[in-house]
Amino acid sequence: MRRFTEGFYGYAVAVFVCLAAAGLFLLITPQSREQHIPRLEYSITVANFGHSVPYGVWAPAKDPAGWVSNSNRITKGENGAQVLSIGYATAKREHAMFVQSDERPAAAFAGRMANSERVVGTEQVGGQTWERRFREDKDQRSLVRMLPEVTLVVTGTADWPELAELAASLQQRPRG
């Protein structure tokens, strides 16, 4: 028995046993080849946000087809303003996020959310004009719409058509 546990032969047997055990483990362990992105419902967050701000809240009427809402939160912005963020994995599995706030000055809020103050053009979405902003080093595109009561920002690594699709889905909800 000592011959099997000493020297090169013993080492080779031990390595073979370990590799066989690892192979057996990988063979019987359930595996999924599909990407799983957890869905996070945002309707309660939007309702809570609506109760805490003095304007009609904007939110997607319906999520774009194939998109997964995977984050949402209410945070404090500058000067005590409330900020609502809803994040998505798009159909092309890029990131997109919708953000809104009545923070003032609106241009500073939009610049901070878009990571850029430079407007590179405009885009018509649902008959409304949105500013286009692009930050190349972060591959971040943003659509910004400044309204009298609130600033809306749609931003992320998604391409312009996907960002426009999210912007087109936004509807203002009644106050309260």
Image (spheres, grey):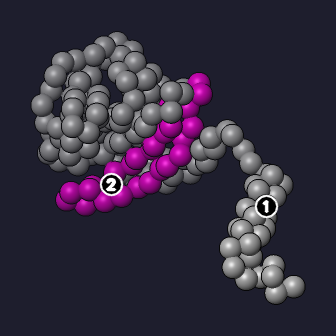
Residue 5 percent across, percent down from the top left: 77, 82
- Measured along the vertical axis of the image, is residue 56 above or below residue 31? above
Amino acid residing under circle 1: Ala
Question: Disc 1 and disc 2: Cα gap in Å?
Answer: 57 Å
- Measured along the vertical axis of the image, is residue 93 above or below residue 30? above
> Which residue is denoted by mark 2 in the rendering?
82
Residue at image location 33% in from the left, 54% down from the top: 82
Earlier residue among tags 1 and 2: 1
**Quick check: can you spot residue 17?**
yes
For this rendering, which residue is in front, 4 or 166? Answer: 4
For this rendering, which residue is in front, 25 or 8? Answer: 8
Residue at image location 37% in from the left, 24% down from the top: 159
For this rendering, which residue is in front, 145 or 176? Answer: 145
> Which residue is denoted by mark 1 in the rendering?
20
Which image quarter holds the N terminus? bottom right
Q: Which residues are magenta?
A: 65-90
Residue 162 percent across, percent down from the top left: 43, 23
Residue at image location 45% in from the left, 43% down from the top: 87
**Which numbered circle lies on residue 176?**
none
SS category of the residue bearing label 1:
helix
**In the image, is residue 77 part of the stretch drawn in magenta?**
yes
Type of secondary structure dominating the magenta stretch: strand
Q: Is residue 76 left or right of residue 117?
A: right
Residue 12 percent across, percent down from the top left: 72, 68
Q: Is residue 163 left or right of residue 16?
A: left
Amino acid residing under circle 2: Gln
**Please, which residue is most extreme toward the right here?**
1
